[in-house]
Image (spheres, rainbow, N blue to C red):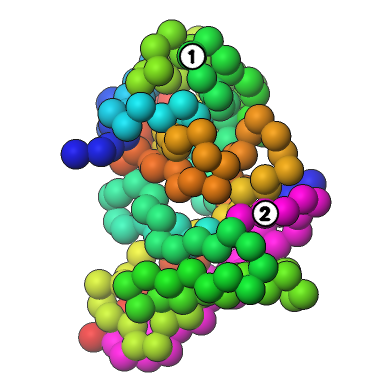
């Protein structure tokens, strides 16, 4: 079956530090890949996505590249801010699973940015 | 404003007392889904619906029911809640496009005593 493995947290960084959150996946079909962010007390919001190999998703200074050869979709940001503190979820949607393109989530990584 | 709404946002109940968590979306989305979020497990799908009157089980359907009588609403029903259903619940919706973004509601935190 499909699965997503992401970096264990929590992760604590200083403001303006470089961020990487690792994510690898296992899928039997042709997944789309997503990063969702959950701010305290809120629901999940889509941060970025990539729908095919070598696509790069980007938003709000975050980037992730769909690497089929390494089955990875690592999240990166060059200079984090305090407002980036949140829980980040990597997820995949298997497009070969006709009828239910559910999201399979990783366990989430809590990120805290210190001023 | 395009959104998914859930009610209630917080609920404390006792074992065996039937409850319903409502979910409504105003984006005319065909696909709707329920997830539960538990520490260390991420989000897991409970039930989904491809359209009105079309529902099916997700990964963890035991103890839950759903209905889809109207396109905009997708309530989650716990007929006889148990403590292991204490969790944070999210409703989500998207259009029929299979690479489209899923939009999530704000969540319902349920505690079953």
Q: Which residue is drawn at 35% across and 27% down?
A: B28
Q: How far apart are marks 2 and 1 (CA)?
A: 26 Å
Q: Where is residue A111 in the image (x, y as percent from the top left)?
A: 41, 72
- Under circle 1, the secondary element is loop
- For the C terminus of chain A, give its image quadrant: bottom left
Which chain is home to disc 2?
A
- The vertical placement of B112 against A71, above or below, is above
Q: Which residue is drawn at 32% across and 24% down?
A: B24
Residue interval drawn in magenta:
A3-32
Q: Position of residue B50 (x, y in %)?
A: 55, 24
Q: Which residue is drawn at 51% across and 20% down?
A: B51
Residue B74: quadrant of the picture: top left
- The vertical placement of B60 against A41, above or below, is above
Q: Residues within 10 Å of mark 2 (few under 14, many from 20)?
A: many
Residue B73: quadrant of the picture: top left
Residue under label 1:
B52
Which chain is home to disc 1?
B
Residue A7 in the magenta stretch? The answer is yes
- The vertical placement of B88 against A57, above or below, is above
Q: How crowded is mark 1: few (under 14 residues within 10 Å), some or many (20 or more)?
A: some
Camera sees residue B88: no
- The vertical placement of A62 against A96, above or below, is below
Q: Position of residue A36 (x, y in %)?
A: 45, 58
Camera sees residue B43: yes
- Under circle 2, the secondary element is strand
Residue under label 2:
A31
């Amino acid at each position: 079956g499909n699965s997503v493995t992401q970096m264990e947290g929590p992760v604590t960084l200083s403001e303006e530090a470089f961020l990487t959150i690792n994510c690898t996946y296992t899928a039997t079909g042709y997944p789309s890949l997503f990063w969702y962010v959950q701010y305290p007390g809120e629901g999940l919001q889509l941060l970025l996505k990539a729908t095919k190999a070598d696509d790069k998703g980007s938003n709000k200074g975050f980037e992730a590249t769909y690497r089929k050869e390494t089955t990875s979709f690592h999240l990166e940001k060059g200079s984090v801010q305090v407002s980036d503190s949140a829980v980040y979820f990597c997820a995949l949607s298997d497009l070969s699973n006709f009828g239910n393109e559910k999201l399979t989530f990783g366990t989430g990584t809590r990120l805290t940015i210190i001023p | 404003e395009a959104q998914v709404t859930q009610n209630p946002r917080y609920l404390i109940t006792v074992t065996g007392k039937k409850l319903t968590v409502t979910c409504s979306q105003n984006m005319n989305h065909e696909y709707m889904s329920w997830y539960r979020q538990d520490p260390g497990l991420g989000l897991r799908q409970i039930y989904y619906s491809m359209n009105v009157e079309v529902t099916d089980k997700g990964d963890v359907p035991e103890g839950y029911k759903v209905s889809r009588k109207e396109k905009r609403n997708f309530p989650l029903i716990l007929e006889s809640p148990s403590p292991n259903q204490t969790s944070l619940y999210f409703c989500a919706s998207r259009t029929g496009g299979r690479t489209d973004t899923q939009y999530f509601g704000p969540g319902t935190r349920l505690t079953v005593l």
